[in-house]
Image: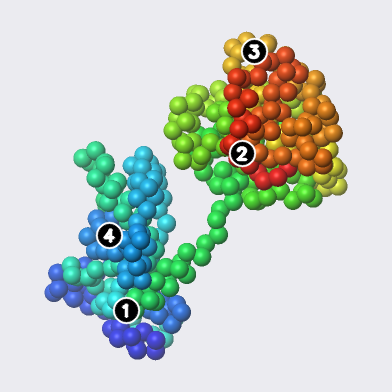
Amino acid sequence: MFFAELGLTQHDSLTAAQQAASEAASASGGRSFTCVVFQQGGRLMLTTAFSHSFLVKHVVANPAAKGGNPRMATNRPMDTAHVRAISKYLVENERNYILPPVTLNVRSVPAIHIPRGNFATTVGFVVIGDETKFSVTDGQHRLAAIMKASESLTDPDSTFMSDSVSVVIVVEPELPRIHQDFADAAQTKQIPASLLAAFNTREPLNRVLTKIVDGSRLFEGRIDETSKSLSKNSPAIFLLNQVRGMVKELLFRDYALSESSIPARSNQVIGSIERQDAFVERTLSMMEILTEHMTPWRAIAELPTSGGPANQVIDYRKHYINMTATGLVIIGHVAYEIEKNQDPAWRTARYLDLASKVDWRRDAEIWQGTIISGDKISTTRAPGRLAAARVMAAIGLSAPADVADSALPGMEPLVGAGV
């Protein structure tokens, strides 16, 4: 009875509903769309798909002006930087992209034809005329990016505007309720950095990261790739995002490089598949030397990845710097300097020194006064840089000239939170 109460037109069969909608569209100059009709929270909802060109024509955004009264507008203020980022993604990946569904609002019920029946959900046909306008409940930046991307495409044979986006249509006439729908739709949980790094392999940095993790005897099966933080009782040795910090040091000499800067820098350093593969090969070579000769990595590599013996990792984490995010960043920073040398034999010798000549225990003198103060380990940039300088001195390398400057402001926390 719910659909009948809302004034939807019911027919004796699906075929009859389809024919009536087609006739109504022809008579009004509109279009008939197949949709799923359902109720949610006491309101009528539709879901279908609209082409990019249809969305541009029929969806009206009403963003609030920055500094103005948002209650008088349908949408929040437009973030132009966010629009540019989405548009750039669409243009660069025109043949291989994905856009999540958008949620639209219509103030009054359009002409909807459905088969007769007491169904909670049914297939129907909605007739949309040229005069029908939708407002955006969720997705205004995506829609603005579609328009911007369409203006940037140079291929005259591009089919981009013929692509479609799944839409959910809410029938809601009241502006306060539309605002509430936006707030309710925004109740999403942020993706943990490790999980994002694991999934977003379109980014060259993440592509080489996953290959390094899968190819390393130490890392394989021992990296937590889903969590936001690493439990003290976890048998995993690192978060994926902590390993990513080491890789950022190896590539850019900056674990704290902003995410917005990474795509451009990655394209400069490892933009081609050949460069990425070469970087992975050299990094895995480094990891194998360190794993074979460094305490406690050598012992951990011999442990199973699960079960009782794997819990020895918990004890190692308590006693060794190279079992922390801070230690990984230091290793990556030193390795960046080692990788500048073109002689493979020289690099191998330095990695052997890094594994065997540096005392990686927390209570070792080399860490005191830099990253270790009492029983606490620092997770900021300047102490880490000074500790790396001591490590380089221990293996016969000269510290970069800017190490002294690292004690100045710029104390970004080391990746991965804590130790």
Instruction: Tell whether 410 sits left or right of 108.
Output: right
- Do the CB atoms of the residues marked 1 and 2 lie less than 8 Å apart? no
Q: Nearer the viewer, mark 1 or mark 2?
A: 2
Residue 86 picture location, percent across and down: 38, 48
- Do the CB atoms of the residues marked 3 and 4 lie less than 8 Å apart? no
Q: Residue at x 61, y 38 (%)?
A: 411
Q: Residue at x 71, y 28 (%)?
A: 387
What amino acid does circle 2 point to? Met
Name the mark on residue 411.
2
Residue at mark 4 = 55
Q: Which sits earlier in the primary sequence, circle 4 or circle 2?
A: 4
The crowd level at tag 4 (other Cα within 10 Å; few <14, some 14-19, many 20+) is many
Q: CA distance from mark 4 to mark 1?
A: 20 Å
Residue at mark 1 = 173
Between 128 and 187, the residue placed more toward the observer is 187
Q: Nearer the viewer, mark 3 or mark 2?
A: 2
What amino acid does circle 4 point to? Leu
Residue at mark 3 = 344
Residue 337 picture location, percent across and down: 62, 20
Indicate the secondary structure of the residue bearing disc 1: loop
Instruction: State the quadrant of the N terminus.
Output: bottom left
Residue 240 picture location, percent across and down: 64, 42
Q: CA distance from mark 1 to mark 2?
A: 51 Å
Q: Which sits earlier in the primary sequence, circle 3 or circle 1?
A: 1
Q: CA distance from mark 3 to mark 4?
A: 57 Å
Q: Above or below — where is 270 with respect to 419?
A: above
Q: Nearer the viewer, mark 4 or mark 2?
A: 2
Q: Residue at x 58, y 44 (%)?
A: 198
Q: CA distance from mark 3 to mark 2?
A: 34 Å
Q: Quadrant of residue 43?
A: bottom left
Q: Which sits earlier in the primary sequence, circle 1 or circle 2?
A: 1
